[in-house]
Image (tube, helix red, strand yellow):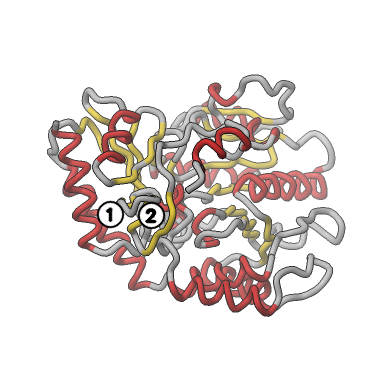
Amino acid sequence: MKDIKSTDRQYVMNTYARFDLLIESGKGAICRDEKGNEYVDFTSGIGVNCLGWCDDEWADAVSAQAHKLNHTSNLYYTEPCALLAQKLCARTGYAKVFFGNSGAEANEGAIKLARKYSYDKYGDGRSKVVTLVNSFHGRTISTLSATGQDGYHKWFFPFTGGFEHVPAGDLYALSNALEGACALVVEFVQGEGGVVALDANFVAEAYEMCRARDVLFVADEVQTGMGRTGKLLASQHFGILPDITTLAKGLGGGLPIGAVLAGEKVANTLGAGMHGSTFGGNPVVCAGANVVVDRLDDKLLADVARKGEYIRSRLDGCPGVKAVSGLGMMVGILPETKKAADIAKQALAKGLLVLTAKDRVRLLPPLTIDDAALEKGMDILTSILKD
């Protein structure tokens, strides 16, 4: 067999610190390398494979659509796109949807939508977008500018202007920053920032502060959305409906998609020619996403919450664990002494895939993982943490 790892290193830009694993196939929560070795997956492709590897219903829908209609551009109507938009609006309470290809693209769309809303209503001088320190919103120049982590702010200067970062929980700093702002963008759980959930009181106060000033409250749910936290949207844990919510990752179930969900206030802000995406709303991708939305019913969401509690129960009091964070099946583990990166390597050697986020081990298992695979994976992980 050709040395795929060497071929990859030679011809693919070396922008990823890949694990020493060549994944050849997968089913459910189990994947296999080229030698047939099995691994329990606690990553779901960084939250993308929410239904697991190669779910039959999802794969059949994608395949059938690929044989029927693969791409049209947005100059024409297609059934999968229209139905997906309808389902998302019906399930979330939003009025309209814009489809793109990624979380970064969805966040770019949300920024444009917020600035256009503010310009239409107030004119120039109210275009600032406020985000939180420790946030992550994407890798385009503008979404890097929105990202509140200095570690990402290297090499690519100059960054896009008009962004300000405030510490999560600091209402005084937020109040000052909202002067001249058109939007506040938050992640309810800061995933790349270490799986840190926002304080409920801060969210409530920030939401009311935005409402009082007609500053749009924007939720980046690229990682927390689509059932990851045990509810369809993480905002439901906080009892609010943001003006705009962005989705990606799990929405496509394994294919690239991004979505901007717009409430009534901003639903008609963008007109023809003001925004677009060649591949946005692609029929094949939307066919898969329709399956994801249909499968995320109350029963599955309740099961996600149950599995999240099981994970935490295994970590509570576990030697080697200093703290546990996150919501639902989005879990961060702060080790007492070990480095998260070392734990991830040890887990790989024992047949378990996990992620890291800063100094924490990050767990994003498929939402559909069965109890046996979940227990096996937790056995491996806790044995490493205790060692």
Disc 2 designates what residue? Answer: 229
Q: Residue 264 carries which label?
A: none
Q: Which residue is drawn at 25% across and 30% down?
A: 335
Left or right: 91, with 306 as reference point: right
Q: Which of 137 and 54 is in front in this view?
A: 54
Residue wearing tag 1: 308
Q: How far across and how far down the image is residue 258, in percent? A: 62, 55
Dot 1: element:
helix
Depth order, front residue of 2/300: 2
Q: How crowded is mark 1: few (under 14 residues within 10 Å), some or many (20 or more)?
A: many
Name the image quarter holding residue 72. Answer: bottom right
x, y percent for residue 236: 43, 58
**Callout 2–callout 1 Cβ contact below 8 Å:** yes
- Vertical comparison of 304 with 335: above or below: below
- Please rate how many residues cluster around mark 2, counting C-alpha atoms within 10 Å: few if below 14, some from 14 to 19, many from 20: many
Amino acid, disc 2: Thr
In front here: 350 or 361? 350
Residue 211 shows up from this direction: no
The residue sitting at 64% across, 73% down in the picture is 66
Q: Is 31 placed left or right of 99 in the picture?
A: left
What's the residue type where badge 1 is placed?
A: Gly
Q: Which of marks 2 and 1 is nearer the N terminus?
A: 2
